[in-house]
Amino acid sequence: MLRPRRLAKGSVFHRIHRKTLSPLFFGPAGALPLQRYDDPAGGYKTLYLALDLETAFGETLVRVPSVSDVLSSDVAVRARSELVATRALSLYPLVDAGVSAHGLSFTELHGADYRRTQGLAAEIHAATKVDGVLYTSRFNDRRCVALFDRAQEAVAIGPTAALLPEEAQALAARFGKVYVDP
């Protein structure tokens, strides 16, 4: 296992989420894993965060690179939230050459088949006491966090607001997408 990285108390995270869910939603809602670092056995839940708003937008609304549009209807059902670390976070790094220690490459970490990353997250969860995983977004070179539910008390909800159409339009353009109001 690699040496954990620390993010300081007061670190700010960004999340774009469905308005019907809390900014602190640890998922998935059911037992089946859905996302990259979810527990394949359903024993723990995961909260996905980005270190900046642009990356949160990409991870949430630019999920399929071949789709050229971001629909206003997809944006309208979401909110943007900031979360703040209430203590220092210990995160397992999947951001550098150490990923090869797990027999993985960045191609696999960023691929569409989540079985290996889910298995690795479960291994990290079981073998360490880290709060989660630090990883790189598939859509830009910026950092994201998959926070395990055992660290739920380590983040607090900050400002939450609607994602405005003009913001969505500018963010979509950063990824070469077009904001469309069908």
Image (cartoon, rainbow, N blue to C red):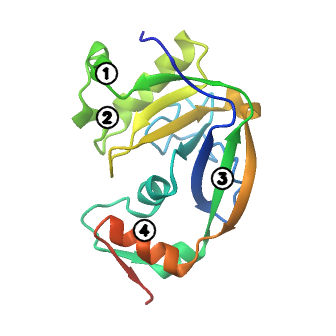
Marks 1,2: beta carbons within 8 A: yes
Marks 3,4: beta carbons within 8 A: no
| Residue at screen point 68% across, 47% down | 83
At label 4, the amino acid type is Leu
- Check disc 4 and report the residue beneath it: 171
- Check disc 1 and report the residue beneath it: 99
In the foreground, 119 or 136: 136
In the image, residue 137 sits, relative to residue 5, either above or below, namely below
Is residue 118 something one can see in this rendering? yes
Tell me the quarter of the image containing the C terminus.
bottom left
Neighbours of disc 4 within 10 Å: few (<14), some (14-19), many (20+):
many
Mark 1 element type: helix
Q: Position of residue 64 (x, y in %)?
A: 32, 61
At label 2, the amino acid type is Leu
At label 3, the amino acid type is Glu
| Residue at screen point 41% across, 58% down | 58
Neighbours of disc 2 within 10 Å: few (<14), some (14-19), many (20+):
many
Label ID, residue 109: 2
Is residue 20 something one can see in this rendering? no
Mark 3 element type: strand
- Check disc 3 and report the residue beneath it: 82
Q: CA distance from mark 3 to mark 4?
A: 17 Å
Tell me the quarter of the image containing the N terminus.
top left
In the image, residue 21 sits, relative to residue 32, either above or below, namely below
Marks 1,3: beta carbons within 8 A: no
| Residue at screen point 47% across, 40% down | 144
**For the residues carrying marks 1 and 3, which lies nearer the camera in this image?**
3
Mark 4 element type: helix
**For the residues carrying marks 2 and 3, which lies nearer the camera in this image?**
3
**For the residues carrying marks 4 and 2, which lies nearer the camera in this image?**
4
Q: Which of the marked residues, 3 or 4, is nearer the chain's N terminus?
A: 3
